[in-house]
Image (cartoon, helix red, strand yellow):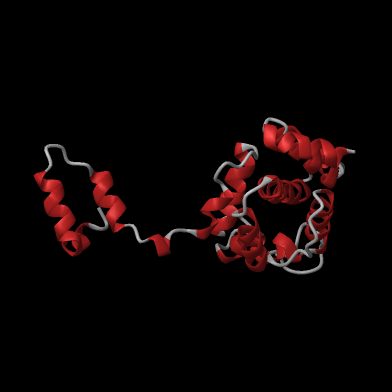
Amino acid sequence: MNQREFIGEFQYTWDRLMMDNRFASRKCYTVMIDDHSRIAWRHLFYRNYARPRASHTTWLACHGRLATKDRLCRFGLIQEKICSLCNEVDESHDHLFFACSESKKVWSEVLNWIDCQHSPQPWNEEIVWILKNIVKKGWKARLLQLAFTETVYSIWRLRNAKKFGDQRYVSIDLKDDIIETIMYRGWSSKKLRKHIANLMC
């Protein structure tokens, strides 16, 4: 409906649609979509073996909509902004993923396990790097996609556990928990199964 005033720009397509026996709004929508305006990180969710909750949390992170302390302060809901993980600097989206010393360490360990040589960067740089690597074909791209999604979710879950005092999750080895999830979720793929078995050796 927001595009109705711009429909005149697609008059030729509109006229053709009007002549058809059956109107298909999908055809009109396809014409109006500009390929350059599509969100780059959509590839992060295509054929991703991560848990739905992990994909949802990562989707929120891509939108910058996670309730980090700096956002809550802007809404006047809290006063204290110190990062729940490192207790060193103010908690923001960019700091939490992956400028924070704690989250950076976890992501580095997961990357080392999947045999990926990369030094984690703050969110904006990291998302560019991850998108560049997951559009490639092959098992490593699929495994990296899964690992990134599960790591973002686990870091967010650990942050919440520390903030709200859930000692059961705080006490676990986060790296091992993420790796176990990657192995379990990736095992359902015949293409990933062999490579995961090799990484387990």
Task: Report the number of numbered marks.
Answer: 0
Q: Residue sitting at 21 percent across and 57 percent down?
A: 4
> Horizontally, is 67 left or right of 83 in the view?
left
Q: In this rendering, would 11 be left or right of 60? A: left
Nearer to me, 131 or 155: 131
Left or right? Give the position of 102 relative to 6: right
Residue 99 seen by the camera: yes
- At 72% from the left and 47% from the top, the residue drawn is 147
Q: Quadrant of the C terminus?
A: top right
Decide if residue 156 is on the left or right side of residue 71: right
Q: Residue at x 65, y 58 (%)?
A: 133
The image shows residue 194 at horizontal and vertical percentages of 77, 35
Looking at the image, the residue that sits furthest to the right is 201
* Nearer to me, 175 or 33: 33
- Picture residue at 82% right of the left edge, 52% below the top: 115
State whether residue 66 appears in this view.
no
Q: Nearer the viewer, residue 67 or 114?
A: 114
Residue 29, percent from left and from top: 28, 51
Residue, far left: 19
Residue 71 falls in image quadrant: bottom right
Q: Position of residue 91 (x, y in %)?
A: 70, 64
**Residue 196, quarter of picture:** top right
Q: Within the image, what quadrant is residue 105 found in? A: bottom right
Percent from the top left, x then y, of residue 2?
27, 57
Q: Nearer the viewer, residue 168 or 41?
A: 41
